[in-house]
Image (cartoon, rainbow, N blue to C red):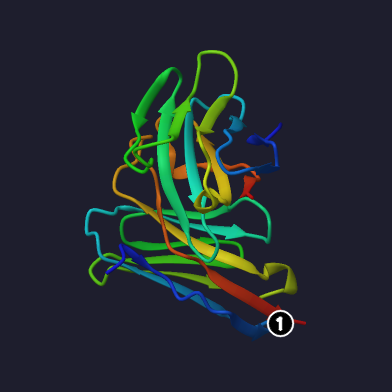
Amino acid sequence: NAGVMQNPRHLVRRRGQEARLRCSPMKGHSHVYWYRQLPEEGLKFMVYLQKENIIDESGMPKERFSAEFPKEGPSILRIQQVVRGDSAAYFCASSPEQSNTEAFFGQGTRLTVV
Amino acid sequence: QKEVEQDPGPLSVPEGAIVSLNCTYSNSAFQYFMWYRQYSRKGPELLMYTYSSGNKEDGRFTAQVDKSSKYISLFIRDSQPSDSATYLCAMSARGGGADGLTFGKGTHLIIQP
């Protein structure tokens, strides 16, 4: 029973490049959440998606960040024109329908912008 | 004032001691309370989940919620070196897949053998 799978585990990008982070939820889970963890900071909610729908993106920066969860395939968090301040650990969580309080997290993608 | 306050520690205790971890919060709409454990360079792992006020026990772990004081606690009995990790409290106003979680910064716990 595979858990939440995130890849890549580590990603290095130069300033101005694009970063694409992938998340495959646990089997049977239809809700996906993305969180960002900056050094010495707690996890901050970014976006909540269901299949083909963005439900809540109140935590997403207004520019350069986007997320999708297509009908087929993993959820994608895309960061365009990355800057050094985007360096962080990005975690994806998934939950069964109607149970966001039992969210299971992936191992995260550590993005480093150089 | 941050929505969720949590002492970052580190908190260092000897093996076998009872550990008390706490969070305070300001948003009275929070009704769902979780504790996660996060080992270094790993994702958070759900330990306990409590709805509204009251206590919940699971093995060596006990979670307490006092909504009147906006204060939640996690107790770990018979602490072991493998419990050394960062403990994150998290909260939500609505269950049922309705919103994301608001986290504390986490408390770094060290259990000395």
Residue furthest to the bottom in view is B14
Relative horizontal placement of residue B84, taking residue B37 as reference (left or right): right
Residue B90 lies, with reference to residue A3, above or below; the image says below
Residue B78 visible to an observer of this rendering: no
Residue at 25 percent across and 65 percent down: it is B26
Describe residue B112's horizontal placement relative to residue A34 as left or right: right
Q: Is residue A59 shown to the viewer in this render?
A: yes
Choose between A23 and A98: the one closer to the eye. Answer: A23
Image coordinates of residue B81 in percent, x first then y, are: 74, 74
In the rendered image, which residue does mark 1 sit on? B15
As displayed, is residue A51 above or below residue B49? above
Residue B22 placement: quadrant? bottom left
Left or right? Give the position of B90 relative to A89.
left
Q: Residue at x 35, y 63 (%)?
A: B54
| Element under disc 1 | loop
Residue A78 placed where, x, y %? 52, 31
Q: Please state, as top left, top right, bottom left or bottom right, where the N terminus of chain A lies in the image.
A: top right
| Amino acid on which disc 1 is placed | Glu
